[in-house]
Amino acid sequence: MDQTDLRAPTRTAAVRPVTPQQRTARAARNGGEPTLEFADRVPYDAYVHASTLHTLQQPLSTDPGEMSFLMVSQIMELYFGLTCHELRQAQRDLRADRVWEALAPLRRAALHLEGLNAAWRGLRWMTPADFNRFRNLLGEGSGFQSAMYRHLEFLLGLRDPALIRPFRRQEEVYDELRAALDVPSLWDDVIALLARHGHDLPADLLERDVTVEHLPHPSVEAAWVEIYDDGGPQNHLRLLGEALTEVAEQFGDWRWNHVKAVQRTMGAKVGSGGSAGLAWLQRSMARVVFPELWSARTAM
Ligand code: HEM
């Protein structure tokens, strides 16, 4: 199991499972109040590691606004990771033809992306003058170098192998990204599933080189038109299409919100990560997630 994937369940010694009977007995002994005495570290911290989490903020300036920039970035990183976790579960379900089961992790992914998008609000206060007070201290650091965001893009089928180059000096991170490129994206898995459900998809599409970006294909678009035209109650594939659309839309919203945040805080200045800034991001945004799910709507 790789670092970026679901972590193996661990049983922290300080978190002791209880039975419903033990819980009821404890509440009765407490007379309606929460437990205040513990022999050890509180179980909440043993589980959430909150005390560790709150040591991970190391601002570079004394500017009071920098903390929200840093923590919003960390919160977004966690959401990137959580969304990847859900999409991998959806992949496992789809590869095993469990379409109905895949809907739950996809729904969770869309909801996490909604939470991710809400996090932008924490940066709406930032004017260019506010950002300039600590921007230089970030050096060449840029969200462009987020490995977890790249995992998310790769899962969604946005695959530019050149974008793993920045991680060459971080062997483990690089190897995980390389490995992520070597396996099908969620969209590749969806296309394989459609073929298994009898949709007419050419072999060269099903056996394509998955390390590079999938190019929109008319046969995939035709399959979705057919699926959406079937109004039957057992049509799980249409529900799958809608669940995927929601994920794509929420992800698109993140990219749009990011561009607006960039425009708001630094206009069209060049980026800290070395790019042209706004113009580069607008080009990057032009890549479409699950392209045929969108284009098919014209033919429905
Ligand atoms: C308002 C504050 C922000 C500004 C001004 C900003 C600016 C930029 C710029 C200019 C780029 C293009 C690459 C470069 O740096 O040259 C970029 C890319 C990126 N930033 Fe931000 N950013 C901000 C906030 C964030 C936050 C909070 C995150 C969350 C972790 C983030 C994640 C990313 C990602 C993932 C990319 C790569 C996008 C892609 O590949 O299409 N950014 N950012």
Image: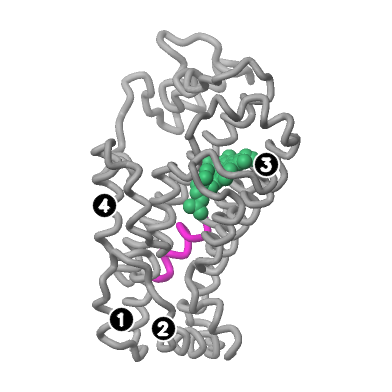
Look at the image and give the residue range highlighted in magenta: 99-108
Q: CA distance from mark 2 to mark 4?
A: 25 Å
How busy is the neighbourhood of tag 2: few (under 14 within 10 Å), some, or many (20 plus)? Answer: few
- Residue occupying image coordinates x 57% and y 30%: 71
Q: How many marks?
A: 4
**Residue pointed to by mark 4:** 178
**Residue pointed to by mark 2:** 217
Q: CA distance from mark 1 to mark 4?
A: 22 Å
Contact flag, marks 1 and 4 (Cβ < 8 Å) = no
- Residue occupying image coordinates x 48% and y 60%: 106
| SS at mark 4 in the image | helix
Q: Quadrant of the C terminus?
A: bottom right
- Which amino acid type is marked by label 2? His
Instruction: Say whether residue 104 is magenta.
Output: yes
Q: Which mark is residue 58?
A: none
Q: 257 above or below 183? A: above
Q: 162 above or below 239? A: above
Whether the residue carrying mark 3 lies under 8 Å from ligand 1 is answered with yes
Contact flag, marks 4 and 3 (Cβ < 8 Å) = no
Q: Nearer the viewer, mark 2 or mark 3?
A: 3
Please tell me which residue lies in front, 209 or 38: 209
Contact flag, marks 1 and 2 (Cβ < 8 Å) = yes
Which mark is first along the chain, 4 or 1? Answer: 4
**Residue pointed to by mark 3:** 266
Q: Which mark is residue 205?
A: 1
Residue 182, x across and y down, in percent: 24, 60
- Which amino acid type is marked by label 3? Met
